[in-house]
Image (cartoon, rainbow, N blue to C red):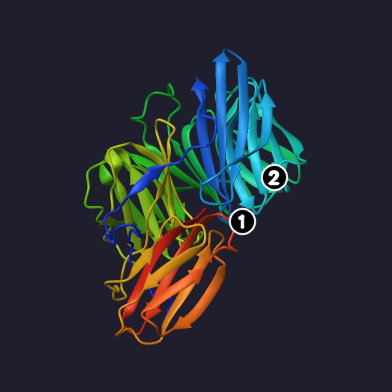
Amino acid sequence: MKYFAIILAILISSGSVKAQWHSLQGFAQPYHFGGLEVDLSPDNSLYVASRYAEGPHQYWSYLYKSNNGGESWSSIYYSSYTSTFLIDCIGPNQLVFSNTDQVNTNFEISSDDFNTYTIVPGCDGAPAAMSFVNLNFGVFTRSFGPSEAIGVVNEGEVSLYPIDTLQFVFSAVQSLSDSIAFVLCRDTHAPYYNLSRNNLVLRTLDGGTNWTIFYSSELYNISHFYFSSAEEGILVGQGGGILSTTDAGANWITENSGTDLDINHITSRNGLFFCAGKGGLILRKNAGETNWEDISYGSSDYRKIMVDSNLIGYLLTTNDQILRSDYILETANWPYLEDVRIYPNPTSDFLTIEIPPDNNNSIIEIINIQGVVVKKLRVSDYNQRLDVRNLSNGLYIIKVLSDKGIRVAKMIKR
């Protein structure tokens, strides 16, 4: 039997499939002119950069890390008189900061959670967006400098390509390799608050030396994009607009978002796509489909959505709150197991799983936040009492599979 089928999103506490999220705490909140940036590492570690500001050119930055889905945090980096504007997690313990003193920007690159790091002198002004494929290569856009520009970091050197006719303050960048990258920008330089500019999506196939127009429009206001390859991508934007292409932009398909709310961000994980935007908007779909499912929560405006390898979701709001989903962000094409009870939750020692007796040869898996199966057993009894005392504290996924269907939930070990 194939157990890789897509899992039904549920809540462990009630068995309901209604979406629920909760706010994460435990890291310093931004102050005054500060703000938050957040990113997920490929090993599902969560990083938060918090900026403090008490006046012009008086800035401090803190970096926090969580290995258990935001249940607890450790402070791993502090910088005085600079402000961390952007963060990009490349791999386990590998990340890139852009740090600025409001005049000049440097890139700080570390492979060991900032126990040590290398400073790459960057540029005048502040990067608006950046995307690294490894610790040696990345693409960024510069605004608030002598000129608008696209920049490339390559082997510790920064190359700038000024383009005064474009505006990058609301730009986005995605690097797919050390040769392929995309940039979203406005086609007219204008005051940063002017959002009514026409859109351009630029593509490079040679590491940033040359850029060509991949998409342009006078009518469509794009906010973000996600590209799976040099030819396939999805654009999202204002009024619920979603466009996709599979042939390098020769043809664009209008997808059915089912909403007229603005979409601010799109991401993909495990063959699923997710969008987030204004008014609590959250959408998802399977790859290859053009109809999106509404899984919205609350009324906050979301500016970023991230999904880890276990399909636990994280949202960053426009007022600098971080939310984590209390359920698995997957759609269901496998029968849902009714009447499975999993308790107590949270737990510190034993976990009881009650499975209806007509579910033969059930399999129970406990998966940690890194996606590793830490406990697996085949059961036939109705009532299973599992000893979890040897598990580290944190968030786990409980998966129950049988010949009748599947049940997935989260468990917190304390």
Q: Find residue 106 and report its image quarter.
A: top right
Q: How many marks?
A: 2
Cα distance between the residues tagged 1 and 2? 23 Å
User: Can see residue 287?
Assistant: no
Q: Find residue 262 and report its image quarter.
A: top left
Pointer 2 local density, CA inside 10 Å: few below 14, some 14–19, many at least 20? some
SS at badge 2: loop
Q: Position of residue 24 (x, y in %)?
A: 45, 41
Mark 1, mark 2: which one is toward the viewer? Answer: 2
Relative side of 86 to 184, left or right: right
> Residue at 30% of width from left, 38% of height from top?
278
Which residue is nearer to you in this view: 251 or 404? 404
Q: Position of residue 232 (x, y in %)?
A: 44, 60
In the displayed structure, would residue 82 be above or below residue 159?
A: above
Which residue is identified by label 1?
177
In the displayed structure, would residue 319 be above or below residue 64?
A: above
Which residue is nearer to you in this view: 255 or 281? 281
Which residue is identified by label 2?
113
Which amino acid does the dot numbered 2 rest on? Asp
Relative side of 413 to 63, left or right: left
